[in-house]
Amino acid sequence: MPPSLRSALRALATSFIPETAGASDVQWAALETRVEQALSVRPQTTRRQLGLFVTLLAAAARVRYRTALTSLDPARRIVLLEWFGRSPVLRFRLGIWGLRTLIMLGWYTQPSVIEALGYRADPAGWDAIR
């Protein structure tokens, strides 16, 4: 993952999932690896569109706030993301949804996060607690 995309991914992650602000280096590496794995099975066009969308978000931050996406304070970053998420342009809404989904996949599939949440899913379903 290119360093510019890595820093943008971290900034976006802290906006979508505030708990990631306290993530360890190991957790960040796991998140990035899971995102890369998820993207590796997608068509090249999808990966390119996602990269372009992150570039668009960075450009919008520069135009609107005169600073980098990664330098925005959390409140202004959330305002920017919500604007794109409510846009009449379907591709913008899909882009926000896709980024959020990838970041959630990268975070909530980590064993340390699952354990911290107390998630105890079992293949037996509800029968496991009876």
Image (cartoon, grey):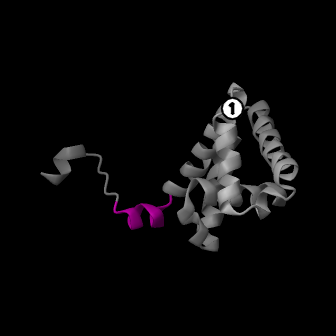
Work out whether residue 99 or residue 16 is closer to the camera in this orientation and state it: 16
- x, y percentage for residue 54? 78, 45
Name the quadrant of the N terminus: bottom right
| Callout count | 1
Q: Is residue 51 above or below residue 110?
A: above
Label 1 neighbour load within 10 Å: few <14, some 14-19, many 20+:
few
- x, y percentage for residue 64? 83, 49
Q: Is residue 41 above or below residue 117?
A: above
Kindly tell me whether residue 5 is visible in this rendering: yes
> Which quadrant of the figure has residue 114?
bottom left
- x, y percentage for residue 34? 61, 53
- Residue depicted at x 29% and y 51%: 122
Work out whether residue 9 or residue 110 is closer to the camera in this orientation and state it: 9
- Residue depicted at x 82% and y 40%: 52
Q: Locate residue 57 relative to residue 88 in the image: left or right.
A: right
Work out whether residue 56 or residue 10 is closer to the camera in this orientation and state it: 56
Give the extent of the magenta segment.
109-118
Work out whether residue 55 or residue 73 is closer to the camera in this orientation and state it: 73
Q: Main secondary structure of the magenta part?
A: helix
Kind of residue at badge 1: Ser
Magenta span includes 42: no
Kindly tell me whether residue 32 is visible in this rendering: no
Classify mark 1: helix, strand or loop: loop
> Which quadrant of the figure has residue 77?
bottom right
Mark 1 sits on what residue?
87
Residue at the outermost left position: 130
Q: Locate residue 83 relative to residue 122 in the image: left or right.
A: right
Magenta span includes 110: yes
- Residue depicted at x 39% and y 65%: 115
- x, y percentage for residue 5? 79, 54
- Residue depicted at x 86% and y 52%: 62
